[in-house]
Image (cartoon, rainbow, N blue to C red):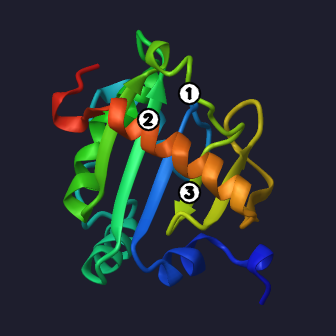
Amino acid sequence: MSQSELGFNELLAAAKHSAVHLEMRDSYGVGDEAEDFESWKRTGQRDVDPASEHWAPWVELIRSTVARGVVVRRARVVSEPVTDYIRYEHAGTVVNLLAGEQVRWLPRRLASDIALPGNDCWVFDSETVLFNQFSGDGNWSEPRWEVRSEAAVARLASEAFETVWERGTPHGKYTV
């Protein structure tokens, strides 16, 4: 299997030191969360049970990754005031933390001078980048991702993430 054919799970399994996720959209419309998001909008209640059907696969994946010594961090660049979707993400981030992720938030107004990649991405060991591909309405596009390993691409995504991370506010201190 060539590197361009690898998916997220394979890249995460191959990570030795770090896996970082840079999110920059104010709303997503991915099918696997649409029902939960709509329920949250109606009730104000978010599924935060790490053992639930929605969360359990992610929690196990991240816990096993962190147990191997890989640091998993997520940084979100968000517009303020935040969208309903960002409120929904914020409400569920407690599960990301329980799984072992570290999460920070950066208001978009503080990111104007950062060279950001054009798409959300995961960076593995500062060497391999998986760019997520979304349609205008925030759903997955086809293909769902593009994997790149050129040094300049990895450097851009890694430096962007690290700058956002340094400026970001840890989840426990960021209010929506």
Q: Which residue does the numbered mark 1 point to in the structure image?
A: 114
Mark 1 residue crowding within 10 angstroms, few (<14) / some (14–19) / many (20+): few
Residue 52 appearing in the image: yes
Of the pair 103 and 138, the residue shown nearer to us = 103
Q: Contact, CB < 8 Å: mark 1 with mark 2?
A: yes
Nearer to the camera, 90 or 147? 147
Q: Residues within 10 Å of mark 2 (few under 14, many from 20)?
A: many
Occupied quadrant, residue 89? top left
| Mark whose residue sits in front, 2 or 3 | 2
Residue position marked by numbered label 2 in the rendering: 164
Q: Residue lying at the far bottom in this picture: please name it.
A: 1
- Residue furthest out toward the right: 142
Classify mark 3: helix, strand or loop: strand
Q: Kindly identify the amino acid type of the residue bearing the numbered disc 2.
A: Val
Q: Residue at label 3?
A: 122
Mark before the other along the chain sequence, 1 or 3: 1
Q: Where residue 47 sits: x, y (%)? A: 29, 47
Disc 3 marks a residue whose amino acid type is Trp
Q: Which mark is first along the chain, 2 or 1?
A: 1
